[in-house]
Image (cartoon, helix red, strand yellow):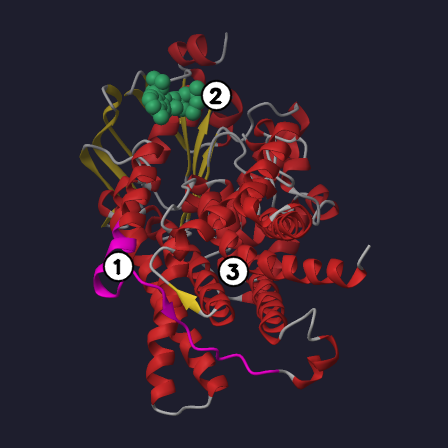
């Protein structure tokens, strides 16, 4: 067996996993709190990428240092995606909060289509090239065949985000309020928790994560179009379900498992079936563990 | 302090509260007793703003609660321990208590108050890092009450705090209700099926029947009342 090839696939699986994790967080958090599958979430990733592209193009033109450009582009992407995420919730989901769940789900699909077409109209349907903003790390030279600078940066950013997010959810007041609301929203109201605020913060954090993922991966891949959110969104959703939707640890685990399965699947079996592995694996896992890897069984959920 | 004036609350077509009026004065312990489905929980939910009355008014120290959101009602100092031990199962005992103090910012005093809860219910202290969902039913009930107290409420609404508890614990819980009422100046509005115990510690009581208040008197008199004795005390 070619050990080098194995490591290459492993590392590229971890890269995919990181991106899926950043996006899957948003699905699982929103589901945990308002029991809605936010179909428009992939579009927030796409909007992050486009915002990043626009800001980066301007700064590039102005001759700003690439690293600084990357930082500023990411900040703008976070701001835009979060603003979209929070606004979408207020306009399209909040009015439907006390109706059947299906209504909000259909609304989410509508928002997803709206955002895709919005970007299509105002930008273009063609692929746009995304500037490479990630510097070459010299220390990677000995292993450059296996590991690239963008990959390292993606690992680091994902790790930082996940740690920060864990601290937020575990130790801060708003984080405790988020967990409480996910478990029993009526009781949370009776403790004086402003649920609307909790929901907004949930959308904000989820969108921010997706935006970071959007900018990083676009900078690595080098091109984007209005449709990129769709397939990545579905994959991240699969990851969230795989891990047990509603569980934060589950979403992260599911994302990395999925990234690795895809990477090894395409590397050792065939790259023609790239998108198939995710769904095959999902079906396989759900057959044996219907609630996902870390999900609670329905009985416990009551 | 709290004044309910002729409220009507509905669940769809079900007319759960049919024009009820009552009053709770500062410092009192008031009981609301009634059979299953009489509308007791609905009364408390209407006060806390989780069910909005279709007509009538609820005022707390002159402020109209029917227009307020549940969290702003809580911020006025109205705390509710609702029916059925609504603890957060995947949060620890400590985290549950901390959430009770969600609207407070005095960190040091919150710590002291948590210790005070552990002194009221030592078992909660022993279990502080255990998940709420792993507590026994009685322990969960203690946690629900302590969490409601963590808010430093002016008015404490308790929905059947003694339901399903062993007699010894029921006695303990009623003692604690009296204690916080006297020593911490917390006004208590108590919903109970356990009419005997509830009326014994109450200044006054109301009897609710099918969404209508049929009787109101001092706790002592209600305990002597023939109708009450037949219907709720099983005499
Ligand atoms: N969410 C709801 N939807 C429809 N009807 C409801 C709902 N909650 C309560 N009801 C009805 O309203 C009436 C009053 O209910 P409520 O829960 O206030 O009674 P209760 O006095 O608290 O009874 P219990 O002692 O059994 O707790 C009942 O007839 C009940 O069936
Ligand atoms: Mg009830």
**Image coords of residue A269 (percent x, y):** 66, 45
Residue at the left extreme?
Answer: B55
**Image coords of residue A202 (percent x, y):** 44, 55
In front: A139, or A161?
A139
Could you tell me how far apart the alpha carbons at marks 3 and 1 are, in whole angstroms?
A: 40 Å
Residue at image coords 50%, 69% = A216
Is residue A248 in view? yes
Please, is residue B218 above or below residue A22 in the view?
above
Along the horizontal axis of the image, is B6 left or right of A225?
left
Along the horizontal axis of the image, is B14 left or right of A246?
left
Could you tell me how far apart the alpha carbons at marks 2 and 3 are, in whole angstroms?
A: 36 Å
Number of marks in the rendered image: 3
Determine the image quadrant of residue B31.
top left
Residue at image coords 70%, 69% = A146
Q: Is mark 2 within 8 Å of ligand 1?
A: yes
Along the horizontal axis of the image, is A227 left or right of B107?
left
Instruction: Report in which chain the residue with disc 3 lies.
Output: A
Q: Is residue A134 magenta?
A: yes
Please identify the quadrant where the N terminus of chain A is shown: bottom right
Q: Determine whether label 2 and label 3 are within 8 Å by CB.
A: no
Q: Secondary structure at mark 3?
A: helix
Residue denoted by label 2:
B193
Q: Residues within 10 Å of mark 1 (few under 14, many from 20)?
A: some
Q: Secondary structure at mark 2?
A: loop
Please, is residue B195 above or below residue B107 in the view?
above
């Amino acid at each position: 067996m070619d050990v080098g090839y194995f490591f290459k696939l492993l590392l590229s699986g971890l890269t995919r996993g990181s991106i899926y994790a950043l996006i899957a967080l948003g699905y699982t958090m929103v589901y945990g709190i308002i029991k809605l599958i936010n179909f428009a979430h992939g579009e927030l990733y796409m909007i992050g990428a486009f915002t990043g592209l626009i800001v980066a193009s301007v700064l590039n033109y102005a001759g700003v240092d690439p690293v600084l450009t990357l930082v500023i582009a990411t900040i703008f992407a976070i701001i835009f995606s979060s603003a979209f995420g929070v606004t979408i919730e207020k306009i399209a989901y909040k009015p439907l909060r006390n109706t059947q769940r299906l209504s909000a789900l259909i609304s989410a699909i509508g928002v997803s289509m709206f955002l895709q077409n919005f970007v299509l109209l105002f930008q273009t349907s063609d692929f746009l090239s995304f500037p490479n903003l990630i510097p070459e790390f010299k220390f990677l030279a000995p292993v450059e065949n296996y590991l690239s600078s963008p990959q390292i940066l993606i690992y680091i950013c994902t790790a930082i985000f996940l740690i920060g997010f864990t601290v937020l959810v575990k130790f801060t007041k708003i984080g405790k309020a988020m967990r409480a609301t996910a478990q029993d929203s009526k009781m949370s109201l009776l403790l004086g928790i402003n649920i609307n605020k909790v929901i907004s913060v949930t959308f904000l954090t989820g969108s921010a994560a997706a935006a970071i993922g959007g900018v990083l991966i676009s900078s690595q891949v080098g091109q984007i179009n209005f449709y990129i959110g769709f397939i990545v969104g579905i994959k991240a959703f699969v990851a969230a379900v795989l891990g047990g939707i509603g569980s934060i640890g589950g979403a992260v685990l599911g994302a990395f498992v999925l990234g690795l399965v895809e990477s090894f699947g395409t590397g050792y079996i065939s790259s023609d079936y790239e998108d198939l592995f995710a769904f095959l694996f999902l079906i396989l896992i759900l057959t044996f563990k219907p609630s996902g890897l870390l999900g609670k069984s329905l009985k416990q959920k009551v | 302090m709290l004044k309910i004036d002729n409220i009507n609350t509905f669940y769809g077509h079900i007319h759960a509260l049919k024009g009820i009026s009552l009053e709770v004065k500062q410092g009192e312990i008031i009981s609301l007793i009634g059979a299953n489905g009489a509308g007791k929980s609905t009364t408390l939910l209407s006060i806390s703003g989780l069910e909005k009355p279709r007509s009538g008014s609820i005022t707390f120290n002159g402020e109209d609660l029917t227009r307020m959101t549940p969290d702003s009602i809580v911020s006025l100092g109205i705390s509710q321990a609702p029916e059925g031990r609504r603890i957060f199962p995947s949060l620890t005992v400590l985290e549950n208590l901390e959430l009770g103090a969600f609207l407070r910012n005095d960190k040091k005093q919150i710590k002291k108050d948590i210790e005070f809860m552990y002194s009221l219910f030592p078992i909660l202290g022993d279990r502080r890092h255990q998940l709420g969902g792993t507590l026994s039913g009685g322990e969960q009930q203690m946690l629900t009450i302590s969490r409601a107290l963590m808010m430093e409420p002016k008015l404490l609404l308790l929905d059947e705090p003694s339901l399903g508890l062993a007699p010894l614990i029921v006695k303990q819980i009623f003692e604690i209700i009296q204690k916080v009422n006297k020593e911490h100046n917390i006004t208590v509005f108590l919903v109970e099926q356990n009419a005997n115990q509830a009326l014994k510690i109450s200044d006054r009581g109301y009897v609710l029947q099918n969404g209508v208040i049929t009787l109101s008197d001092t706790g002592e008199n209600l305990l002597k009342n023939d109708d009450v004795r037949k219907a709720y005390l099983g005499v």
